[in-house]
């Protein structure tokens, strides 16, 4: 191998003379050999006031100066140790290959940063895709705020700063609270794996604020208006929107379930129609005797049965075909559904933002006055009673409002 001079290592702060939005700049390791230079990130950002340019290190006034300085020294030692190993093996070592030192470091040990830990744990977790998407969103927010986050940085001040960062993005207070909740979940996992000390949990001191969300549902009078709505032949697509909304209101099904209903999910018996599905979110089996929900006069089908019967008539020619049980009742996205509901609200003069969840919430509020709490919890497939109690409170509030309208004198 060609003879190369020994690589020299030094530290450089704010090489590009450019601060981040948080007023910080990067510390880099400069590797110099034979009039060539290469720069390596330490992933450590500090404010200029904390950099000691004379001694090429972080000042004592920085809260993490000891940890950061130690980490920088360790990284430089790893680079030089790798270089010496290669020199002993080959007789020389070029600057262009110094980046390979990173591959020589044992990566089988604990993750070097909390963000790495978050990412690896999230990838290995068996959570649902929808939940993974939300946790990824929080991880990206964390990276947007700080970049690489080390375990020892996770203190009260860091969480407070992250909270302020989220607030500056004009996020809803409950959305911010959810980001904290997801971050807290992985901090607890890091604690359980002894990567963070138990008494160093930053959420012991920081309590995210929240507010009671507005829980919109429609009244029986508003429901009657939607039921009475009719459309021309050119607006048949709106009839399907109306049917899905009403079915969600009559059954309490989530949009993910009602929008994916198949012919095989409906069974007919002497009593009437029964719906049997495996819920997408909970993966639990739900059996609903449709003939018991929103009953009409004796001998007449229930309101959900009337809607399903209309679609079953359309499927009549295909009932004996192989695979007919997989035929879908609807083909629609949640975005298009909610967008089309605006027209339904306009036609019925309902001054509320109708969504698929408003229908489910309306079902829960109506049923809270008709069945016991454990039955309502089972119908809604809630994992905890306190989730169901929200709708019981809404229903009680509705009763109180109606009683207040009575003119007694």
Image (spheres, rainbow, N blue to C red):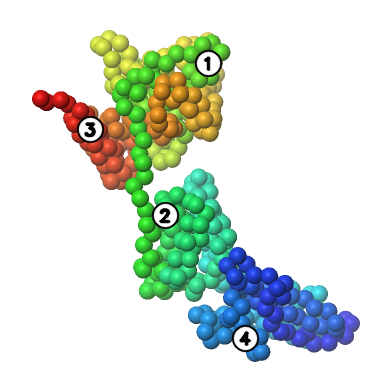
Judge whether 217 appears above or below 58 on screen.
Answer: above
> Along the line of sight, which residue is nearer the eye, 33 or 28?
28
Disc 2: which residue? 177
Q: Earlier in the sequence, mark 1 or mark 2?
A: 2
Q: Give the spatial CA distance, label 2 vs label 3.
A: 31 Å
Q: Position of residue 278 (x, y in %)?
A: 42, 34
Place residue 82 in its image quadrant: bottom right
Single out the residue that lies furthest toward the bottom.
55
> Along the line of sight, which residue is nearer the eye, 28 or 347?
347
Residue 115 visible somewhere in the drawing = yes
Quarter placement of the N terminus: bottom right
What secondary structure is found at the residue carrying circle 2? helix
What secondary structure is found at the residue carrying circle 3? helix
Disc 1: which residue? 236
How many residues crowd mark 2 within 10 Å: few (<14), some (14–19), many (20+)?
some
Residue at (53, 81) in percent of width and height: 62
Q: Give the spatial CA distance, label 3 vs label 1.
A: 37 Å
Q: Give the spatial CA distance, label 1 vs label 2.
A: 41 Å
What secondary structure is found at the residue carrying circle 1? helix
Residue 290 visible somewhere in the drawing = no
Q: Earlier in the sequence, mark 4 or mark 3?
A: 4
Q: Give the spatial CA distance, label 2 vs label 4.
A: 38 Å
Q: Earlier in the sequence, mark 3 or mark 1?
A: 1
Q: Determine which of the numbered discs, if any, sits on residue 52 in the image.
A: 4
Q: Give the spatial CA distance, label 4 vs label 3.
A: 67 Å
Count of marks, rendered view: 4
Q: Determine which of the numbered discs, if any, sits on residue 401 in the image.
A: 3
Front position among marks 2 and 3: 3
């Amino acid at each position: 191998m060609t003879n190369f001079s020994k690589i020299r290592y030094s530290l450089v702060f704010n090489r590009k003379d450019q601060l981040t939005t948080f007023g910080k700049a990067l510390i880099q390791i400069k590797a110099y050999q034979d009039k060539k230079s290469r720069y390596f990130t330490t992933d450590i950002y500090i404010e200029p006031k904390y950099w000691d340019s004379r001694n090429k290190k972080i000042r004592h006034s920085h809260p993490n100066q000891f940890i950061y300085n130690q980490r920088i020294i360790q990284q430089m030692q790893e680079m030089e140790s790798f270089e010496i190993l290669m020199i002993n093996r080959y007789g020389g070592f070029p600057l262009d290959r110094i980046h390979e030192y990173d591959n020589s470091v044992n990566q089988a040990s604990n993750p070097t940063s909390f963000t790495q830990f978050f990412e690896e744990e999230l990838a290995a977790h068996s959570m649902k895709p929808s939940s993974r998407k939300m946790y990824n969103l929080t991880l990206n927010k964390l990276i947007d705020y700080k970049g690489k986050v080390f375990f020892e940085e996770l203190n009260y001040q860091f969480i407070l700063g992250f909270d302020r960062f989220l607030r500056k993005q004009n996020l809803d207070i409950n959305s911010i609270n959810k980001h904290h909740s997801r971050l807290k979940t992985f901090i607890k996992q890091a604690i359980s794996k002894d990567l963070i000390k138990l008494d160093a949990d930053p959420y012991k001191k920081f309590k995210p604020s929240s507010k009671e969300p507005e829980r919109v549902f429609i009244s029986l009078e508003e429901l009657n208006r939607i039921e009475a709505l009719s459309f021309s032949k050119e607006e048949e697509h709106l009839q399907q929107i109306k049917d899905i909304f009403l079915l969600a209101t009559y059954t309490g099904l989530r949009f993910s379930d009602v929008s994916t209903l198949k012919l095989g999910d409906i069974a007919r018996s002497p009593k009437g129609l029964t719906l049997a599905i495996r819920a997408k979110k909970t993966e639990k089996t739900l059996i609903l005797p449709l003939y018991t929900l929103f009953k009409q006069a004796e001998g007449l089908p229930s309101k959900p049965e009337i809607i399903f019967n209309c679609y079953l008539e359309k499927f009549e020619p295909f009932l004996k075909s192989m695979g007919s049980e997989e035929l879908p009742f609807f083909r629609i996205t949640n975005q298009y559904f909610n967008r089309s509901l605006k027209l339904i609200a306009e036609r019925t003069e309902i001054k509320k933002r109708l969504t698929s969840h408003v229908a489910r919430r309306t079902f829960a509020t109506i049923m809270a006055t008709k069945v016991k709490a454990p039955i309502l919890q089972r119908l809604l497939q809630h994992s905890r009673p306190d989730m169901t109690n929200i709708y019981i409170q809404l229903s009680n509030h509705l009763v109180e409002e109606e009683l207040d309208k009575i003119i007694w004198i």
